[in-house]
Image (spheres, rainbow, N blue to C red):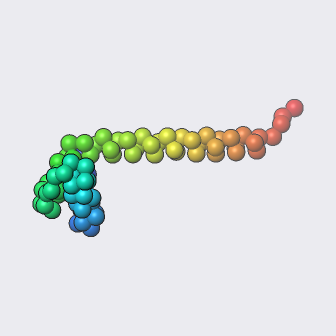
Amino acid sequence: MDSVIKFSKEEKERIIPKIKMYLSEELNVEIGNFDAEFLLDFFSEEVGSYFYNRGLNDAIDMLDARMDEVKESIYVLEKPVN
């Protein structure tokens, strides 16, 4: 499995201005679209797997919590035995 997060053209069109704005406002650095896209690709390759794995772990935690709720609902249906 490829560990690089791939962004569509439309996603990049929404992300790149945010990178440029952040660098401008926070670091007083002006970059062009090409450099912002290069920076996005760099972070995707270098840290994308961390974000991906965190998302998977969050999904597992949420699924575990929901499964606990389902189990509790099923235990309520249990009939007493003599």
Relative to 14, say whether 38 is above or below: above
Name the residue furthest top: 82
Question: Which image quarter: residue 76?
Answer: top right
Q: Residue at x 28, y 43 (%)?
A: 49
Q: Give x and y (percent) for residue 45.
A: 20, 46
In front of the other: 19 or 46: 19
**Residue in the picture at 25% in, 54% down:** 25
**The residue positioned farthest toward the right in the image shown:** 82
Kindly indicate the quadrant of the structure image that contains residue 57: top left
Q: Position of residue 71 (x, y in %)?
A: 65, 41
Q: Is 52 left or right of 69, judged from the image as shown?
A: left
How many numbered marks, from 0 up?
0
Point out residue 54 in the picture as x, y percentages from the top left corner: 37, 41
Query: Which picture quadrant has residue 58?
Result: top left
Residue 59 visible to an observer of this rendering? yes
Q: Which residue is painted at 13% across and 61% down in the image? A: 32
- Residues 74 and 11: in front is 11
Residue at horizontal 35 percent and vertical 41 percent from the top:
53
Judge whether residue 6 can be spotted in this image: no
Q: Nearer the viewer, residue 57 or 41?
A: 41
Whether residue 36 sits left or right of residue 8 in the image: it is left
Image height check: is 17 above or below 27?
below
Q: Quadrant of the C terminus?
A: top right
Horizontal and vertical percent for residue 70?
Answer: 64, 45
